[in-house]
Amino acid sequence: MLAKDNNNYKILDEIKISKVNGPNNLKLERILKESLNLSYTNSPIYSLEVTVGFENTSMAILKDSQTTRYRVKVILNYNLKEINTQKIIDSGNLYLYSSYDVSASDFMNYISEKYVSENGLIELAEELKNRLILVISTRRNEQ
């Protein structure tokens, strides 16, 4: 993992999460704060805006049009801005696919979808963390 180094945590400490949009925005904000290990000991220099979305599609369909497997696409869009100038430093889209089997129980399907979606958010938060470290450290080296 890239973000184990203490210097990387200092870099992440310069980021403030300013806006999280989409379904499960409170859960995503919690996951991001945990992943980025934000303690706000320094005055933030950068502002992070994140939007999350989910797309469910049938993946395995039987001859009688019954779905037996769903694929979930988790999409995370982000903008990293410099707080003083509001200039966008970096922006991008991260996404991943995951899937789950459909069972006879509606409750089990609900739990499976939530489990897949939350794990997708955790993975994308880790990917975002590594991107932010790379962008900010590269920017520091150029200055």
Image (cartoon, helix red, strand yellow):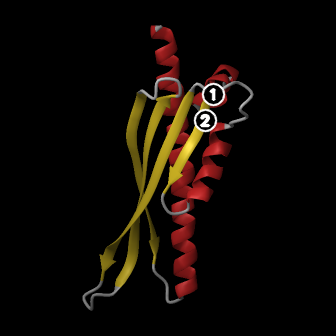
- Label 2 sits on a secondary structure element that is strand
**Relative to 56, 11 lies left or right:** right
Label pair 1/2, CB-CB below 8 angstroms = yes
Say which amino acid is labelled 2.
Answer: Lys
Tell me the residue at 49%/42% (across/down): 49
Whole-number angstrom distance, CA of label 1 to CA of label 2: 6 Å
In the rendered view, tell whether residue 114 sits above or below residue 30. below
Q: Nearer the viewer, residue 16 or 56?
A: 16
Q: Mark 2: few, some, or many residues within 10 Å (few <14, many ≥20)?
A: many
Q: Position of residue 23 (x, y in %)?
A: 50, 63
Q: Position of residue 85 (x, y in %)?
A: 47, 24
- Label 1 sits on a secondary structure element that is loop
Tell me the residue at 53%/46% (across/down): 19
Q: Nearer the viewer, residue 89 or 128?
A: 89
Number of marks in picture: 2
Say which amino acid is labelled 1.
Answer: Pro
Q: Position of residue 123 (x, y in %)?
A: 53, 48
Q: Position of residue 3 (x, y in %)?
A: 61, 30
Q: Which residue is farthest bottom?
A: 64
**Relative to 76, 35 lies left or right:** right
For residue 44, which numbered disc appears in the image?
1
Q: Earlier in the sequence, mark 1 or mark 2?
A: 2
Hey, which quadrant is residue 99 in on the image? bottom left
Q: Which residue is mark 2?
A: 16
In the rendered view, tell whether residue 4 sits above or below residue 143. below
Tell me the residue at 47%/7% (across/down): 143
In the rendered view, tell whether residue 28 sits above or below residue 32. below
- In the picture, the quarter occupied by the N terminus is top right
For residue 27, which numbered disc appears in the image?
none
Q: Mark 1: few, some, or many residues within 10 Å (few <14, many ≥20)?
A: some
Tell me the residue at 40%/50% (across/down): 95
Q: Nearer the viewer, residue 52 or 115?
A: 52
